[in-house]
Image (spheres, rainbow, N blue to C red):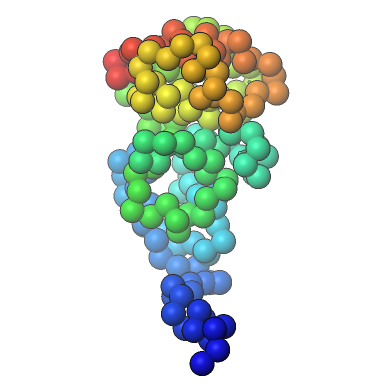
Amino acid sequence: MSATTVSATQGPAAVGPDAVPITLTINGQRHPLSVEPRVTLLDAMRTRLDITGQKRVCDRGACGACTVIIDGRTYYSCSMLAIEAQGRNIRTVDGLAKGDTLHPVQQAFCDNDGLMCGFCTPGFVMATVALLEKNPNPTAEQARKALDGNLCRCGTNIGVLKAALAAKGVTRG
Ligand code: FES
Ligand code: FES
């Protein structure tokens, strides 16, 4: 048996190209759905589940607008397949507010002019939440570094940094 035949017969079972049933756990809720394996987590959320908080801006892992928290760390949801996200705890900006009460990080963005057009904002908010859950009292330098995977084309970076530092220590409030 050739090496090629061995890897073809012993590798993981192939799925697709047709839609396959998967279940995603997003903001604490289980969502069964059927997607082609090529569909990204971002597109599965936005176009199949109507969970539209994270934005599709560059769709190529360059801007951070699609940032979600999965099992405690940030990911670009445009750069992960939906089928890869099964069995994991996915969090989006949609799940942060409690009723009419914004999450402290969301409130800090409002209070500190951390947004203009708003397309980058959900990604920045999730990156900030992830930072503060891991390090509740970051220095400005640590906050800047944690947010350097997110871009704002409107130039709100100073407001974003102020918001992140204003929300220090209150993220679970
Ligand atoms: S939309 Fe995902 S990184 Fe830009
Ligand atoms: S507020 Fe417009 S891209 Fe950031």
Occupied quadrant, residue 159: top right
* 58 displayed left or right of 134: right
Tell me residue 56's x, y (percent). 61, 40
Residue 46 visible here: no
Q: Nearer the viewer, residue 151 or 21?
A: 151
Q: Nearer the viewer, residue 145 or 36?
A: 145
- The residue shown at (34%, 44%) is 89
Image position of 5 with respect to 50: above or below: below
Tell me residue 140's x, y (percent). 51, 11
- The residue shown at (39%, 61%) is 22
- The residue shown at (51%, 55%) is 81
Residue 14 visible here: yes
Tell me residue 76's x, y (percent). 54, 41
Occupied quadrant, residue 172: top left
Occupied quadrant, residue 147: top right
* 96 displayed left or right of 8: left
Mark count: 0
- The residue shown at (37%, 20%) is 135
* 8 displayed left or right of 85: right
Q: Nearer the viewer, residue 66 or 145?
A: 145
Image position of 32 with respect to 2: above or below: above
Q: Quadrant of the C terminus?
A: top left
